[in-house]
Image: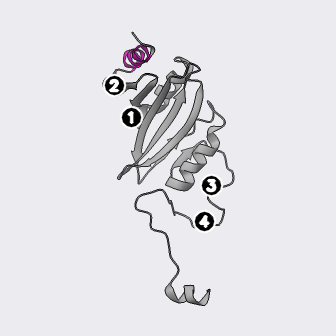
Amino acid sequence: MTEENNIQQKFVEKFSYLSGSVTVQRPRRMLADVPAANFHEVFDYAVKNLGFSILCTITGLDEGAALGFIYHLAKENGVVLNLHTSVPKEKPVIKTIMPYFPAAEDYERELVDLFGAQVQGLPEGSRYPLPDDWPANQFPLRKDWKPKTPEKKEAIENA
């Protein structure tokens, strides 16, 4: 049995609701689709019990009616686990993973600025990566975002 299959089996033994949701995509690459309500217990188990000690990045996705988040974790030996979860776009609340990985702060600030996620437990801080004067409730990586363009008259006057 490969290490990836062993990890897959451990996930399903621990969390029966993950049966069919943890796949080995190819050697050293795994994907787990985790319900939002169970995300933190699965994340905690992956880090504390399965040795996923490296946070590579967090990817945000606009999935239409939901926002998706993929947490890319790795082990020292190169096995990568992508934990995917989704939350409704109208209430995109997730919890911070900073207690596990303090460097997640910048990734989580990107989710706030670019997608409008609400990250519970993220400390107050400056915006990232958008400038401080960026308009409120304008999330440029959402598919339905339309940049505000100046009126034709304003553009001519300011030229």
Q: Is residue 59 left or right of residue 1?
A: right
The image quadrant where one finds the C terminus is bottom right
Ranked by sequence position, the earlier of labels 4 and 1 is 1
Q: CA distance from mark 4 to mark 2?
A: 41 Å
| Discs 1/3, front | 3
For the residues bearing labels 2 and 1, Cβ distance under 8 angstroms: yes
Give the label on residue 111, or none: none
**Which residue in the protein does label 4 denote?**
134
| Residue type, numbered disc 4 | Trp
Q: CA distance from mark 4 to mark 1?
A: 32 Å
Q: Is residue 2 left or right of residue 73?
A: left
Residue at horizontal 41 percent and vertical 54 percent from the top: 90
Ranked by sequence position, the earlier of labels 1 and 3 is 1
For the residues bearing labels 3 and 2, Cβ distance under 8 angstroms: no
Give the label on residue 129, or none: 3
Q: Quick check: 30 above or below 6?
A: below
Report if residue 26 is visible in the image: yes
| Residue bounds of the magenta highlight | 4-15
Q: Is residue 28 left or right of residue 156?
A: left
Q: Mark 2: few, some, or many residues within 10 Å (few <14, many ≥20)?
A: few
Horizontal and vertical percent for residue 122? 62, 44
| Residue type, numbered disc 2 | Tyr
The image quadrant where one finds the N terminus is top left
